[in-house]
Image (cartoon, rainbow, N blue to C red):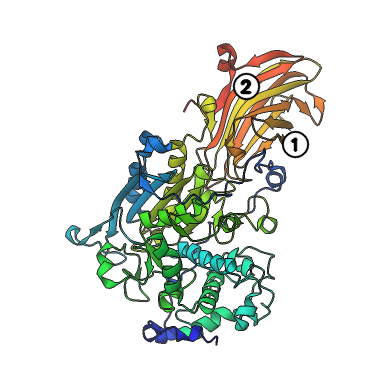
């Protein structure tokens, strides 16, 4: 056993020692907080996804100067947010609370932009249930407030990742260091070549989960089980979201610092940032402010005041993957530190270059088009909860208890949504629906859909749908082209806008190859007539040849823009402004003309905002 690992006290060992002989209900197993599983996208959509890399002479959005800006209260309009749109958030939360079953018991939301806290709202109950089926009397319930303390669950991983990168900056640790060089037991079962970076990005080959809390009698044996676990795949070959990797990284921090992880995080992250309401193992006197989580049959009580994650609880409440409690305001401070290039006021937590490294994807070659994206800890481009704010640079993480933190560096915007979605049972938890709606509401409040297309046609607001926008035109021999003003923000490779044409009354359709151009942006080629992804938040002038495999189409031609969405997750959708058909320099069709506009057939597309 590593010498500094055995110092952990067995706070829960006595209560859990006999658990090995207790049958475990399936619902009482913490499985981390992975993104919802999806089948791989259609091969054609994956192959033809446009290259939406940064384009143009733009600085990387995470190339942050060490501004040191601190949060302040601000009016929404002073930081670029439409207050009327933000006022939709209470209705979004209330819909989640009134859902059957409720998506969460209570919620606290904070929105900040340009270092200004522009919106806070809370609804529901921090404590509502006595057990999995019995509600407390109204007088005994605790309402959720904007300063309610929540179990952050897997958002704790960002604190661990930050601690790891502080050690990298000090030269005590390297991203390419083999984990076993710091924790020799980790080499067991063929894991000798797994590196620190592999664990930070969840490509270390470790299983997603092992049962520590009931399969092992005490903390030392649980830690040893983590270190000696058998891998599932060779390192660097597959993405598997794993709590075990972050537990291991927490152990490295403890060994290198000589401090328990909670003390290290306090001394080097939360205390310098003034995050006085962020902690592991909160004291009993704070219980009235803490959101309750789940009634767990295995424990025989409602979890309220200690970490919900069973493995973290069995490790004394302090672990690299879970255990941190915080408020929305405190968590916003952490986010602002990242936006400040590692600084917040006079406190420097990370170097600006480290922050950029932290928020730069490392696994695209492993996961492919439409797959997960990970920096050194943060989850990036996560459509399932970033929704309308999604870009290749958006982060940060969710938590299984119903928490989420989103940073959009393109607008310097922070969205904190903390809920207790597992209260009273994880079987009800469907928080990501509300997460998406809140993120998209903030995106709309920021005006991310440019004004020049808002009075055009819009689709993509429904899951599992197909919407078509069609027009007909008579073409003579010779080249002709479709010109379209387009804005797209679609889940990469899953939601797809296809531009196509038919010369046989719709019996067969040919994709229209084309090219997109916009001011201050590098052109984007569209060889297969398909658009998907974040679209760089630009309005594009699209030019598409009306041809089938290079041969110009002739006669009565039907042209359509077909948007298909999958069964879950979406962004802002697709917006179409002006549509034109040109041949020999003449406009055969132009939706700026009212008669032509009236000929457009919209099935599933709506006009205007």
Which residue has dot 2 on it?
Answer: 579
Query: Disc 2 on helix, strand or loop?
Result: strand
Q: Earlier in the sequence, mark 1 or mark 2?
A: 1
Which residue has dot 1 on it?
Answer: 527
Q: Is residue 218 above or below residue 601?
A: below
For the point 55% across and 76% down, which residue is it?
252
For the residues labelled 1 and 2, the Cα–Cα distance comes to 20 Å
Q: Residues within 10 Å of mark 1 (few under 14, many from 20)?
A: some
Pointers 1 and 2 in contact (C-beta within 8 Å): no
Instruction: Choose between 119 and 170: the one closer to the eye.
Output: 170
Among the 4 quarters of the image, the one containing residue 172:
bottom right
Whether residue 340 appears in this view of the structure is yes
Q: Position of residue 511 (x, y in %)?
A: 72, 33
Q: Position of residue 250 (x, y in %)?
A: 51, 73
Position of the N terminus by quadrant: bottom right
**Total marks placed:** 2
Q: Is residue 214 above or below residue 543?
A: below
Query: Disc 1 on helix, strand or loop?
Result: loop
Among the 4 quarters of the image, the one containing residue 208:
bottom right
């Amino acid at each position: 056993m590593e010498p500094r690992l055995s110092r952990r006290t067995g706070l829960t060992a006595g209560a859990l020692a006999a658990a090995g002989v207790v049958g475990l209900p399936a619902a009482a197993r913490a499985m981390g907080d992975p993104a919802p599983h999806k089948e791989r996208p259609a091969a054609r959509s994956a192959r033809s996804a446009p290259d939406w890399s940064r384009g143009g002479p733009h600085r990387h959005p995470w190339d942050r100067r060490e501004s040191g800006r601190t949060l302040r209260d601000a009016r929404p309009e002073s930081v670029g947010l439409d207050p009327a749109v933000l006022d939709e958030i209470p209705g979004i939360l209330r819909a989640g609370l009134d859902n059957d079953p409720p998506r969460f018991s209570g919620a606290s939301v904070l929105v900040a932009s340009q270092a200004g806290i522009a919106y806070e709202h809370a609804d529901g109950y921090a404590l509502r249930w006595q057990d999995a089926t019995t509600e407390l009397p109204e007088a005994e319930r605790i309402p959720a407030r904007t300063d309610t303390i929540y179990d952050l669950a897997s958002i704790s991983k960002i604190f661990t990742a930050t601690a790891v990168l502080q050690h990298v900056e000090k030269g005590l640790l390297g991203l390419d260091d083999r984990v076993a060089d710091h924790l020799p037991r980790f080499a067991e079962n063929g894991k000798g070549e797994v590196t620190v970076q592999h664990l930070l990005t969840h490509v270390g080959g470790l299983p997603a989960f092992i049962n520590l809390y009931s399969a092992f009698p005490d903390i030392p044996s649980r830690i040893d089980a983590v270190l000696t676990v058998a891998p599932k795949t060779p390192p660097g070959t597959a993405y598997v979201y794993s709590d075990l990797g972050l537990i291991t990284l927490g152990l490295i921090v403890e060994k290198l610092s000589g401090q328990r992880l909670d003390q290290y995080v306090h001394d080097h992250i939360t205390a310098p940032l003034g995050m006085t309401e962020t902690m592991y193992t909160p004291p009993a006197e704070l219980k009235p402010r803490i959101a309750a989580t789940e009634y767990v049959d295995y424990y025989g009580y409602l979890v309220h005041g200690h970490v919900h994650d069973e493995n973290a609880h069995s490790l004394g409440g302090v672990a690299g993957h879970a255990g941190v409690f915080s408020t929305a305001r405190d968590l916003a401070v952490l986010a602002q530190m990242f936006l400040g290039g590692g600084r917040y006021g006079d406190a420097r937590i990370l170097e600006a270059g480290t922050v950029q490294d932290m928020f730069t994807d490392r696994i695209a070659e492993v996961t492919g088009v439409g797959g997960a994206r990970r920096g050194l800890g943060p989850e990036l481009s996560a459509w399932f909860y970033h929704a309308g704010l999604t870009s290749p640079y958006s982060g940060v993480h969710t938590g299984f208890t119903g928490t989420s933190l989103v940073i959009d560096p393109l607008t310097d915007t922070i969205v904190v949504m903390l809920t207790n979605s597992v209260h009273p049972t994880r079987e009800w938890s469907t928080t990501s629906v509300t997460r998406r709606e809140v993120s998209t509401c903030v995106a709309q409040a920021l005006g991310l859909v440019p004004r020049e297309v808002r009075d055009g046609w819009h689709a993509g607001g429904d899951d599992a749908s197909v919407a078509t926008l069609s027009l007909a035109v008579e073409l003579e021999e010779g080249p002709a082209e479709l010109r379209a003003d387009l804005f797209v923000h679609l889940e990469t490779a899953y939601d797809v806008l296809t531009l196509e044409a038919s010369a046989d009354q719709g019996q067969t359709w040919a994709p229209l190859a084309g090219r997109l151009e916009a001011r201050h942006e590098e052109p984007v080629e569209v060889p297969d007539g398909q658009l998907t992804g974040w679209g760089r938040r630009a309005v594009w002038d699209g030019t598409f040849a009306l041809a089938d495999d290079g041969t110009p189409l002739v006669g009565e031609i039907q042209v359509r823009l077909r948007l298909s969405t999958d069964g879950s997750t979406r962004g802002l959708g697709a917006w179409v402004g002006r549509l034109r058909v040109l041949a020999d320099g003449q406009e055969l069709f132009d939706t700026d003309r009212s008669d032509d506009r009236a000929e457009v057939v919209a099935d599933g597309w709506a006009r205007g905002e």
